[in-house]
Amino acid sequence: MTSGQGSMNTPHGSIPASALPTRRQTLALAGAALLFPASAGAQVRAANWRPSKSVRLVVPFAAGGANDIIARVLGEQLSVMWQQQVYIDNKPGASSNIGSADVARSEPDGHHLLITSSAIAVNRFLFEKLPFDPLADFAPLSLAVVIPNVMVVPPGSSARTVGDFIALAKAKPGALNFGSAGVGSSLHLIGELFKRAAGIEMTHVPYRGAAPAMQDLVGGRIDVMFDTVTVSISQIRGGTIRAIGVSTQERVPALPDVPPIRDTLPGFDVGSWFALFMPGKAPPEIVAQVSADVQAALRQEKVKTRIEELGGRVAASTPEVLARYMREEMDRWGKLIREAGIKAQDG
């Protein structure tokens, strides 16, 4: 992704830089949240509102992915704060639409939450019809975490650098493939950006979540994957996969020996983000209280430390900041998806 002005010129045309959301823009959200410390929404509180029963935190992807890992770290802290069980309900499928739709239809009483990725902002451009309106049917709660992505290959791959991989792909046009968590997932879009930036052809292989894609990468059934550092780091350290580049401008502290992709493809810069929502018809006072509690949980030192150990960064925000960011992401990704011709093929 480009971080400056101009455009990214590719064999498939020129993609304007304004269409490409950068890590810098994403991380700016954490700072933007500080501009709204006493927003109107944050001041509307139900007196001592707390969950009266177990809280369901829906992850619209398979267990084992970054979304799932973040949910479990956050859910554990919320369970302590609320003195009620917060249990993870994985509902993968249809590029996250199944799980998201489930929450949109749920009782808006504070006991059904959604933690999802940028899919909630981009799926309206991938599917002819969604089972929900991403703006009207959800109440934003807080941005949660932003995470760099890492380009990983099987241990038996002859590619030891980004340059090596590009050379292999150019030597065998269309023969290599890349896996992702699903059509239109952030991991898919990053792969498409890489293809265009590098001027290569690869076949996209979508999975129902990052974890099954990673299993096939380890087994050598796919050639490359762009995954979050959070998910990949244990396999990288264990030697079951090899990291050859990170997607952000700087090296990642958790993987100091892995160079940025931009060293080979100048201007390439992108990360993944995750955020929390609840049903859109939830009363404002419950939205405000749950948002405040989620932000407080994210800012707990042990949560921040755990996320940083996994290569991510906590970016808690107010509902207002997340709502604004959602619209910005829709503008950016929508333009990119249209110009790249990406369409959902199946559920």
Image: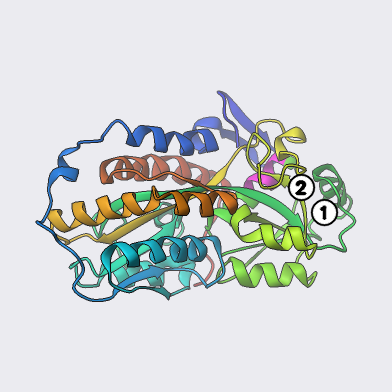
9 relative position to 92: left or right: right
Residue at 45% x, 57% y: name it: 119
Q: How far apart, in angstroms, are the residues tagged by discs 2 and 1?
A: 7 Å
Name the spot of residue 223 as percent of width and height, x first.
78, 62
> Is residue 306 placed above or below 56 in the rendered structure?
above
153 relative position to 250: left or right: right
- Find residue 214 and name its label: none
Residue at 75% x, 33% y: name it: 263
Residue at 77% x, 43% y: name it: 257
Magenta region, residue range? 192-197
- Find residue 200 and name its label: 2
Query: Pointer 2 and pointer 1: residues touching (CB < 8 Å)?
Result: yes
Magenta span has 196?
Answer: yes
> Is residue 92 placed above or below 200 in the rendered structure?
below
Which residue carries the number 1 mark?
173
Q: Residues within 10 Å of mark 2 (few under 14, many from 20)?
A: many
> Is residue 268 placed above or below 211 in the rendered structure?
above
Quadrant of the image containing the N terminus: top right
Between residue 19 and residue 284, name the one nearer to us: 284
- Secondary element at image label 2: loop
Q: Amino acid at mark 2?
A: Ile
Between residue 155 and residue 256, name the one nearer to us: 256
